Image (cartoon, rainbow, N blue to C red):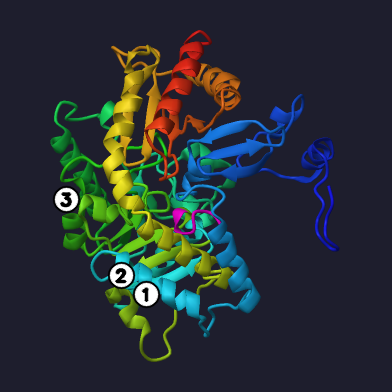
């Protein structure tokens, strides 16, 4: 391999494997898995496909990590990054601004529902959630309600890894290694209708029941202590729980009644995943804050944002008051330039419309898997689906911890990858396979997903 002077020369695969095992600390990864095998190494992406260091192709059915909305290998996004880096590679948004951050903030305000006109940039989703909680607490102090600081979120919901965002997260096993965390967070039921503890024969009544549990917690804790409710439009963790009809309308009523901020955590659901720029628009509710990241740049550069209403900004517009919070790389010039180019692709290629038009076909294709004994539920919306795996379809019996370990980590994760598909086999909640393909996918890709899943899940049934 020849290189230009000063250009990095990539080492061969075996040398990289040694270096990876000796030095690279992977995220959310059991490193013991590589004692007897290689670290999977992805070296290239093109459209909806990714390729490993051995040249094998995989269908990226998870968009990287719910990220690469416009697909891999978009040279215009790389060119936008290079152009911006050559003009202004970095400058912080600490008392100064730069053009692409201003332009992107204006553009996001135009997409966001209602009066969500104030954009605070971060580098990722967890930071956006952290920012939203801090804003909620300071806002209520500034308007004379200093005891409002508590947060409500849903069971099994994931909201990020920073200390505050992890505290809001509803996954006890994920939080336990890092306790004590930030206090004052409380959980309510999620909208998993497949395992509804009440009104299992009436979706709308179940939604009302689930929403009313929020009011119940507010009353129990005291309305003068609760600052915000954090909800995803479609809850990711647990396997894609859409909201029942009327759910968010009732949540909005509750938040208005008790003066509690409704935070729509759209780190996954924003930017086309549900066929709209924002999930709140998809389901017709008005949040006070939206948190977002991932698809904003399609992963070509790190960027997140908290989008707040004018009302929440108002106390910061006069006197010596400031939001004493920020990130060195939040609103990075290169990232905001990439985001603008990414959103240009959205509009030029009508990606939201494509998702809306294709969503029914994706659902229909995945629902073919219902004939497998291991498939209990297929649920989701847009290009965002979870397939729940069960021991018994009739009783909905799930797997115990040992069985889930053998099924997911002992077989499925590797088998899916070996079969040529990149997706997620997860047991945060009951065992699921999650799918969130790039927004450019078409029926041929849906069919490929279904065929690979059918083969692997059929074999999985024999490993239980």
* Residue 328 at least partly seen: no
Q: Residue at image x 36%, y 16%? A: 397
Left or right: residue 105 compared with residue 197: right
Q: Position of residue 265 (x, y in %)?
A: 37, 54
Residue receiving disc 2? 110
Q: Residue at image x 60%, y 24%? A: 418
Is residue 103 depicted above or below 130 in this figure? Answer: below
Is residue 463 depicted above or below 119 in this figure? Answer: above
Question: Which badge, 1 or 3, is on the more N-terminal residue?
Answer: 1
Q: Quadrant of residue 252?
A: bottom left
| Discs 1/3, front | 1
Residue receiving disc 3? 250
* Residue 338 at least partly seen: yes
Residues rendered magenta in the picture:
295-301
The front one of 7 and 138 is: 7
Q: Do the residues bearing badges 2 and 1 touch, measured as CB atoms within 8 Å?
A: yes
Residue 209, magenta (yes or no)? no
Predominant secondary structure, magenta span: loop
Residue receiving disc 1? 106
């Amino acid at each position: 391999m020849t290189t230009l002077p000063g250009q990095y020369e990539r080492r061969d695969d075996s040398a990289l494997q040694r270096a990876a095992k000796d030095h690279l600390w992977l995220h959310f990864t059991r490193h013991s898995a590589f004692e007897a095998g290689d670290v999977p190494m992805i070296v290239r992406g093109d459209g909806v496909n990714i390729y490993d260091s051995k040249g094998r192709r995989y269908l990226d059915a998870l968009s990287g990590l719910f990220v690469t909305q416009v697909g891999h290998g978009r040279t215009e996004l790389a060119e936008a990054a290079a152009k911006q880096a050559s003009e202004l590679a970095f400058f912080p948004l600490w008392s100064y601004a730069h053009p692409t951050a201003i332009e992107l903030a204006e553009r996001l305000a135009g997409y966001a529902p209602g009066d969500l006109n104030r954009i605070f940039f971060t580098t990722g989703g967890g930071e956006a959630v952290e920012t939203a909680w801090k804003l909620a607490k300071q806002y209520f102090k500034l308007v004379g309600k200093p005891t409002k600081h508590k947060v409500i979120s849903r069971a099994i919901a994931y909201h990020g890894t920073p200390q505050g965002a992890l505290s809001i997260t509803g996954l006890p096993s994920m939080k336990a290694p890092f306790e004590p965390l930030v206090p004052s967070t409380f959980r309510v039921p999620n909208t998993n209708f497949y395992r509804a503890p009440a009104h299992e024969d009436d979706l709308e009544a179940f939604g009302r029941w689930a929403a009313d549990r929020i009011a119940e917690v507010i009353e129990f804790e005291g309305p003068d202590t609760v600052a915000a409710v954090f909800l995803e439009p479609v809850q990711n963790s647990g396997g894609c729980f859409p909201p029942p009809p009327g759910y968010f309308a009732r949540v909005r009523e509750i938040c208005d009644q008790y003066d509690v901020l409704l935070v729509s955590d759209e780190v996954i659901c924003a930017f086309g995943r549900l066929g709209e720029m924002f999930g709140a628009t998809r389901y017709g509710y008005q949040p006070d804050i939206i948190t977002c990241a991932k698809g904003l740049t399609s992963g070509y550069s790190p960027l997140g944002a908290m989008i707040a209403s004018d009302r929440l900004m108002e106390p910061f517009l006069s006197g010596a008051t400031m939001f004493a919070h920020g990130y060195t790389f939040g609103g990075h010039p290169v990232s905001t330039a990439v985001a603008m180019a990414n959103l240009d692709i959205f509009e030029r290629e009508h990606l939201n419309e494509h998702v809306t038009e294709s969503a029914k076909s994706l659902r229909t294709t995945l629902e073919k898997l219902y004939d497998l004994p291991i498939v209990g539920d297929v649920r989701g919306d847009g290009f965002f689906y979870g397939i729940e795996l069960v021991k018994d379809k009739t009783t909905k019996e799930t797997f115990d911890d040992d069985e889930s370990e053998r099924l997911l980590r002992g077989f499925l994760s590797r088998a899916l990858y070996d079969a040529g598909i990149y997706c997620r086999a997860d047991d945060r909640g009951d065992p699921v396979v999650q799918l969130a393909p790039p927004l450019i996918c078409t029926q041929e890709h849906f069919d490929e997903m279904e065929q690979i899943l059918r083969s692997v899940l059929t074999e999985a049934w024999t490993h239980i």
